[in-house]
Amino acid sequence: MNQQDFTRKRKLSFVGLVVSQINLISKSISVELSKFIERFVSNSQDYSKQAFCQQRLKLKPQAFVALNQLLIEEFYADDELHTFQGYVVLAIDSTLLQLPQSAAIINEYGIAENKGQSMPMSRSSLLYDVENKLVLQAISGKYTDDEQHMALQHIDYVCQHVTKQRCLLLFDRGYPSLALLACLVSKKLDYVLRCNADFINEVADFAQSPQLDAWLEIDLQTPGRQKIHSLEAWLQPGQKQLRVRAIKIKLPSGKAEFLLTSLPERQGKSGFRHCHFKGLYHKRWAVETGIDFHKNDLQLENFSAKTVIGIQQDYHAHILTANLTSLLVEDAQAELEAEPVKHQNKHHYQINRAVALGLVKDKLPELLSDDEQLRQQVYQELIAKIKKRKIAQKPDRSFPRLTKLHYKFKNNRRPVL
């Protein structure tokens, strides 16, 4: 925060403070600090909770954002990315986070009220690579922030930082707007966006028609659309229409879902036919499971501070930790798939990410050590352990939504931290 910060020699240095938070503080701060200092600093020393809270006020939360950006840049500089027909598939979605109660946090993020009760909350939005299981950008904003506005920030990030690869953006039903479509067209980004049948008149007419796949000409000159000020910023001079491809997918329930996309049916030797879109849009589910992983397995809402700086530190440190864990899991998954397949195996197997996180916990400081031999040793040990924690993939499973009792502890989701 200031030039003079971290200039004096302390038990917990700048590096130690950063690494201790990347290692995730999920239990009592005093317990976590005592274990961290004993293992990685000195067996004969201890560190108080009060000293840690004072020390962390010197650290900008942007430190973790910068480290995550460095990690992302290094990863995407490599050509060995998981892609879909040459596209890096990115999904955007948001969720609400419960925050600790304090006047400063309420003033910064806002408060949610329900049936006479109130709680500080914030909106978290993720730009998520669904094939490589990485969070490229995480935004934590006010409770009242509009997720479409946050999506525009993610789009700017893609245009500035993901320039070597072609990107395909996936959106659910909470995002469609004419302004967003015009923005994506203006920035020449490909997209698949789900919308309701009554989103606009052109989609409503398509929904009533027998067609399953059609190009729509969206008229921007109607009186109502001319008044959309957010739309004007993305239109070319004299532009009077938007051209989008509409896809109708029949679901097993008998209902239909509607997708809008920029992807052509033919593109060189490849293309995206109608039959491709159900599986392509389903890839967006990875961001849903990613958010669930962050909030439940990673305990994202288990904040270790009641200050705005502390909340932001915890939030961005969690994102960085999840990405580091994902890289380990992907390495373990690659080794697992390279092993000979046993004939008695009925299913394809994937690594259990939640268990992998539990195994990585308390090993991250050693993985980030400047001791190359120690790093390699810990890395190989972790990969070997993570490979053994695998679960069977069962495609096309679906379950009816049932009302469940809310137990305080769940046997099928025991804490891993």
Image (cartoon, rainbow, N blue to C red):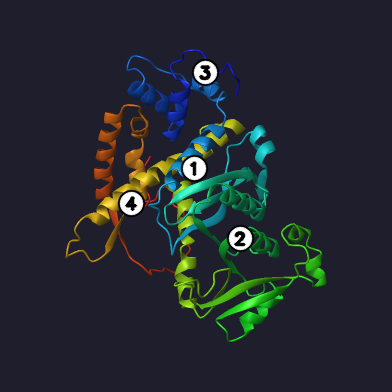
Q: Is residue 73 above or below residue 86?
A: above
Q: Secondary structure at mark 4?
A: loop
Estimate the spatial distance between the alpha carbons at disc 1 and disc 4, rounded to whole Å: 19 Å
Q: Which residue is under mark 2?
A: 188
Disc 1 residue crowd, few under 14, some 14–19, many 20+, Cα 10 Å = many
Q: Could you tell me if the residues under marks 1 and 3 are in contact, i.e. CB atoms within 8 Å?
A: no
* Comparing labels 3 and 2, the label whose residue is closer to the camera: 2
**Residue 160 percent location from the top left of the image:** 58, 47
Residue at point 59%, 19% (across, down): 3
Q: Earlier in the sequence, mark 3 or mark 2?
A: 3
Say what amino acid the circle numbered 2 marks. Answer: Lys
Name the outermost residue toward the left. Answer: 343
Q: Which of pointers 4 and 2 lies earlier in the amino acid sequence?
A: 2
Tell me the tag on residue 352. Answer: 4
In the displayed structure, does residue 59 sit left or right of residue 347? right
User: Left or right of 337: which side holds 49?
Assistant: right
Reading the chain from its start, which is encountered first: label 2 or label 1? 2
The amino acid type, in three-letter code, at marker 1 is Leu
